[in-house]
Image: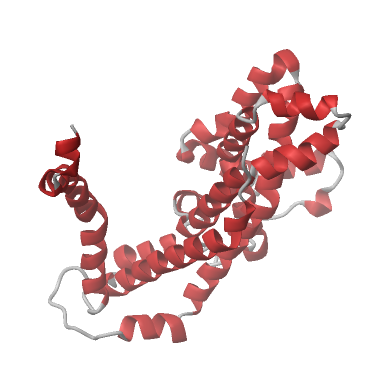
Amino acid sequence: MNTVISDKKTIFWLVAPGFILIAAMIFIPIMVSLYYSLTDWDGVTDYRFIGLSNFIEIVTKDAVFWKSLLNALLLGLGLVFVQHPLSVLTAMVVPYCGRFEKLLRASFFIPSIISTFVTTQLWVSVFNTQFGLLNRLLERLGLEAWKQDWLGDPKLAICCMIFVCIWQGFGYAFLLYYAGIKGVPKELYEAAMLDGATQAQVHGHIIFPLLAPVVRVNIILAVVAAFKQMETVYLMTGGGPADSTQFLSTYLYSKAFREGLYGYGNALSILLVLICLIMTVLLNRALQKDVGEY
């Protein structure tokens, strides 16, 4: 066995299928996309190379691109500073709910396993101006002045969008934090309690530091998910009204397949990949020191 492991040719042939698969599924599509991003191809007719023109136009003239980027940042902030604190708090409380623990755990995770199409249509119905539950509820409470065209007003539409995304992803974030808390050895709890520590001190000085790796992974996943957001936006508003809920993924889809600007859409996709990579590296470096150990 040691002879096989030390043989470089054997190692090469063992890992080669994996590298080929990764190249075929990730690197080759990115390279092809980069190639077309340097053209003015409309997806049908002949194309010509235009160099970096698409990228220059996106960065210097495309206001919708910057709007999409701002929306992604807002969603990322919403996930990090609203969804995750709530998830951590819920994950800490649920283990103390006795016989209701399993029920609550399953209930919080349900939105994450239901089809995005179903949950999105549910919220579209809730926000509907004419028959939506939200406006009906405000009417019943005597707050008719608060009734709004929730998805028709650009300022309200992006808030509704961020709220729905936070709600949809809450279950995943909760489950990861819940698993992290459950993974903390009971001996640490017991030792701290024997030393006279309160529940607040146990959570503040033991659980929070040990959750640091989970927090780091969750934050990186949340920020990258915010920049890649596609399904919910496309199904709820399609990026409207007036591009107020446009995100990078929906915008590049619109450019490539609705307007026929395939080269331009590919340039947007390359920028999306670069932004996700940069954000991942920056967050990894920023959060690297907060890793706890048992």
- Residue displayed at 23% across by 67% down: 31
> Image check: 208 left or right of 293?
right
Query: Where, by quadrant of the figure, is residue 273 drawn?
Result: bottom left
At x 14% / y 44%, what residue is drawn? 7
Position of residue 64 relative to residue 280, above or below, is: below
What residue occupies the far front of the structure in this picture?
3
Count of labels shown? Answer: 0
Q: Residue 123, percent across and down?
A: 59, 42
Q: Which of the 4 image quadrants contains residue 155?
A: bottom right
Q: Position of residue 66 (x, y in %)?
A: 52, 75
Depicted 195 relative to depicted 201: above or below: above
Q: In the drawing, does residue 37 fall left or right of residue 111?
A: left
Residue 152 visible somewhere in the drawing: no
**Above or below for 87 versus 147:** above
| Quarter of the figure that contains the N terminus | top left
Q: Could you tell me residue 90's position as x and y percent?
A: 71, 34
- In which quadrant of the rendered image does the C terminus lie? top right
